[in-house]
Image: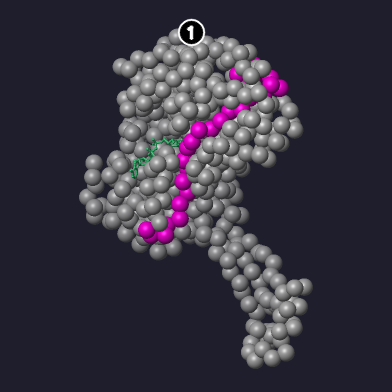
Amino acid sequence: MLLEESSIANILNKQRQFFATGKTKNVDFRIEQLKKLKRAVSDYQEKIAAAVKADLNRPKFEAYFELTFLTEINDAIKKLKSWVKPRRVSTPIEQFPAGAKIYPEPLGVVLIIGAWNYPFQLVIYPLLGAIASGNCGIIKPSEIAVNTSEVVADLIANTFDSNYIAAVTGGVEVSQQLLAEKFDYILFTGGTRVGKIVMEAAAKNLTPVTLELGGKSPCIVDDDIQLEYTAKRITWGKFINAGQTCVAPDYLLVNKSVKSDLLEKIKQSIEEFYGENPAESPDYCRIINEKQFNRLSDLLKDGKIFIGGETKSEERYISPTVIEGVDWDSEIMQEEIFGPILPVLEYENLDEAIALVNSRPKPLSLYFFSRNKRKQEQVLRETSSGNVCINDTVMQFGVPSLPFGGVGNSGIGSYHGKASFDTFSHYKSVLNKGLWFDLNIRYAPYKNKVGLIRRIIFR
Ligand code: NAD
């Protein structure tokens, strides 16, 4: 649906006017808004669970993954007064007399665009950072998770004045309309292709961006592992939300000597989690839409299916699937899978595995299973990714003190915890000079002063 052009411009203008009143700069106001957001999310929890069930057949337990950020609201409420304090920094002697401080200040009106896979969290989580930092903002949930998008819009409309925080729903055209406007910051979550479109649009207005993108996150498995936990943790991280998780392990790169044992254990874990027929499990999600279902079904043609491979188009079901016999040129290894299909490649020594990972674009997440500390250090030192989790999958997303974001093709910038506050703040550097003394050296005439400046610079 195309919105009346004036309606987006109208919301934006009103938010600019509201921002100009300075109200959002008041810390007590921000804390009040965070409390309101927390209450609203708590009041809407059943509606959110029902919406993600309708969109993705998400079991109620996994629906609560959408709300894990709530603990961060408490943290922001508790720490905001210290976060907003200007931070004193040192000044060099030649600046004497002077004091220097860094002031965090809000940016203005920000835009948050979300993806469909965690359709509530991916807009509300950044919003908490935008509010904490004192901004106004517009959020645009993904149109593809249609039910959740409506719940988000309803929650926002019932909680905030649209002159302060508004939700705009709609498809790609609405995103494009929003991107044609000038915002003071854009946080986008989605695929790399659209990330480039967002960055291009932002560049026209010199708007800074955080791009939370995806990619093929490798899961490297060494020969020195705790087999049972490794299998369980990989199975869990890959198949929650039917693999439609940005930080899901995309493929396994496993040491040849443990491959068959690991695959047997993964098979057992799948059966343990979802039963013999996952189609009947109340705990297994569905693919978001037909387009994604067809794309994923095509990928099942690659290699040899070790487990799974069943599909039911009428309910967009793809069983948890593990595929062997693929190589780096197979179709499944070209793009992010973003579904419940786990291709397995093998390696003989760790150097080889690292070289293979490094020959690809930098991933969002990298997983390494090994008890060997020296190898853990080697992987950390020799690879680059947005984040790393050793001996587990996905869990790094839930540590608020770890900034979350990608690098290279998997994104720009980060958020979560204090990093969300930093993302939506400008850190203003302020030098305040004393007036009771004035060092004359900088003023002309410079005669006889070159030696002095040289000594200062090369001291
Ligand atoms: P997407 O890029 O297709 O869409 C994301 C948003 O962009 C939607 O709101 C959509 O309306 C908008 N959009 C789509 N096409 C557009 C265009 N041409 N111009 C302007 N706006 C447009 O992504 P998706 O399919 O919703 O999500 C899947 C991707 O998101 C995966 O790659 C996944 O890894 C990534 N992701 C990343 C994170 C993260 O935190 N890094 C989280 C979730 C998903």
Number of residue marks: 1
Residue 229 located within the stretch drawn in magenta: yes
Q: In which quarter of the image is residue 119?
A: top left
In this orientation, which residue lies closer to the viewer: 181 or 152? 181
x and y percentages locating residue 249 in the rendered image: 54, 28
Q: Residue at x 41, y 51 (%)?
A: 199
x and y percentages locating residue 157 in the rendered image: 34, 44
On-image quarter of the N terminus: top left
Q: Residue at x 69, y 91 (%)?
A: 447
Give the residues drawn in magenta, as a range. 204-231
Identify whether 241 is placed above or below 209: above
Label 1 Cα neighbours within 10 Å, binned few <14 / some 14-19 / many ≥20: few
> In which quadrant of this rendering is ligand 1 seen?
top left
Q: Quadrant of residue 136?
A: bottom left
Q: Mark 1 points at which residue?
A: 276
Can residue 195 be seen?
Answer: yes
